[in-house]
Image (tube, rainbow, N blue to C red):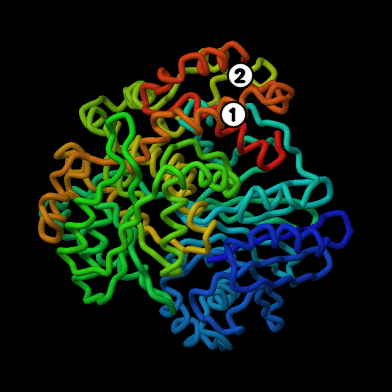
Amino acid sequence: MCGIGGEVRFDGVPADLGIVAGLTAAMEPRGPDGRGLWHDGWAALGHRRLSIIDLSDAGAQPMTDDRHGIAIVFNGCVYNYRELRDELARDGYAFRSTSDTEVIIAAYHRWGERFVEHLVGMFAVALVDRQRRRLVLARDRLGIKPLYLARRPGGLRFASTLPALLRAGDVDTSLDPVGLHHYFTWHSIVPGTHTVLAGVSKLPPATVRVVEADGRTRDRVYWRPDYVRDPAMDAADWKAELTSALRTAVQRRLVADVPVGVLLSGGLDSSLIVALLAEAGQRDLQTFSIGFESAAGEGGDEFRYSDAVAAAFGTDHHRIRVPNAELMPAVERSIAAMTEPLGTHDVVAFYLLCQHVSQHVKVAQSGQGADEVFAGYRYHAPLAAAPRDAALDVFAGAFFDRDHAALAEILDPDHLCDRDASRELVAAHLAAPGADTALDAVLRLDTHLLMPDDPVKRVDTMSMAWGLELRTPFLDQDLVELAAKCPPALKAAHGGKGILKELARDLVPATVIDRPKGYFPVPALRHLDGPLLDLVADVLTSPTAKQRGLFQPAFVEQLLLHPDQHTQRTGANKLWQLGLLELWLQAHDAG
């Protein structure tokens, strides 16, 4: 788990090692344990290290293999690296470290561009093949590890964070109308290749991109599971198979040379992780929960549930309570840490939780992804009964913050996309073959398009701000592929995540399974008032915001006049959505 970056040039000019050193330094929080640089004419690589596997200097990056002419920087963890290492050793490969990075080098030499198909884990890889004079970029199947790209005249830069590319300079920071359209349609989610900035894109999940020394590129999507049925299995078979796959997923994420904890919200997903670790014999497991002050009659913690799970499995439990006095300073610090603007209110909660967790462990498991994979959101139940061709209308009615016409009320015409880009993207994704039912199509959309840029990005950004590696068992590639084939009725049963609840009954307390679905509660942010309202009002009326001219003044004025009417039908906060974007742009001197 680290921060990676680099530059390649296509115009005969050497890559600028000083630029790469600067963008690498900008990612120090992601890798506080070490740094490294490598240069070879047209290509330069940089790395910030968080030591998790092979803590010795032999595991440092950039890592080179002079015999095969390969240099690499890599962010993430390959959970099956020991098995791959043994397989490659039988093929004659020798290793000088015990790191997963060196295994990736050997895998590339052995299997070429198909090396990613042998990796089980989360990863963003940048590999320079010196003999073929090409850069190979790869991202894991579910997009857990980020990789941002800035194409420039004569070259390409890349980094684990968007702000690192901005720190390097010479990036087009004008606002991207398509990225803005997505941001304001899907409560700040900007999926796929886009960001809110025109000059920065993302490598999509499950993609290998080969960049030749003359600038030519080609992409290959190496994983795309089908959401179709296996008629040979009944409900009991699915319960057994999914339980086994989840056990494997949790066990895989224990691979580390340091202790591994768990973020325990008290919900079904994180409680299952704790139960399976206890079942596997983990002792002295550290678990962590966070809570906030109540506001407007809404409770700010779910400690009664997390306490019950911790007691049931005898964990070393840390209960973290954050007073509102600490919340306000954390808002601005978390915005500065965001690699992209993230408008959901729980981002600050993750930021503060990860700050406390990082003081005790370097690695923790988390329950993100279960709702997308196992149909846990409110809009999934209606989709289970909807015709296949109704998926778009049902999903849009439940998930979209606003339609295309309503965006004209928010954005200045100069920043308004000339087409309904968000609905078009969703429609194309839902209509693609390989999904049997309306719910299948939406779960595929949730998992493979939206999730990498919502809960996954939120978790990676806020954990890495504190040098903490978070691992997500529910996004194990084999579990996701198996769950994709599971009948939708089993997933949508019992108000959502039905099959998960059934397998949990053998493992966790019933009070956790049968409780109402909870979300990460931060009442002071959901009910915007006091200093937080003042912060948003100040930034939206600042000279910088007025000069940018992003928003329609009348829309901002009405929101500020009636801040108590700011909640959208999806639960997103209109005022916070606008203020957060402007705060992020100003924090990073962008737009």
- Amino acid type at circle 1 is Leu
Residue at 22% x, 58% y: name it: 272
Q: Are marks 2 and 1 in contact (CB under 8 Å)?
A: yes
Left or right relative to 556: residue 449: left
Residue at 27% x, 32% y: name it: 378
Q: Residues within 10 Å of mark 2 (few under 14, many from 20)?
A: many
Q: Where is residue 187 drawn, in percent x and y? A: 46, 31
Q: Where is residue 163 drawn, in percent x and y? A: 66, 48
| Quarter occupied by the C terminus | top right
Looking at the picture, tell me which residue is in the foreground, 245 or 579. 579
Numbered circle sitting on residue 73? none
SS under mark 1: helix
Residue at 25% x, 75% y: name it: 282
Say above or below: 545 vs 492.
above
Q: Earlier in the sequence, mark 2 or mark 1?
A: 1
Q: Is residue 437 visible?
A: no
Numbered circle sitting on residue 411? 2
Numbered circle sitting on residue 180? 1
Left or right relative to 305: residue 526: right
Q: Would you identify the image quadrant in which residue 62 lies?
A: bottom right
Q: Is residue 581 visible?
A: yes
Say above or below: 307 vs 587.
below
Q: Where is residue 397 drawn, in percent x and y? A: 36, 21
Q: Nearer the viewer, mark 2 or mark 1?
A: 2
Residue at 63% x, 63% y: name it: 28
SS under mark 2: loop
Say above or below: 247 vs 388.
below
- Amino acid type at circle 2 is Leu
Left or right relative to 285: residue 350: right
Looking at the picture, tell me which residue is in the foreground, 4 or 362. 362
Q: Where is residue 144 drawn, in percent x and y? A: 47, 54
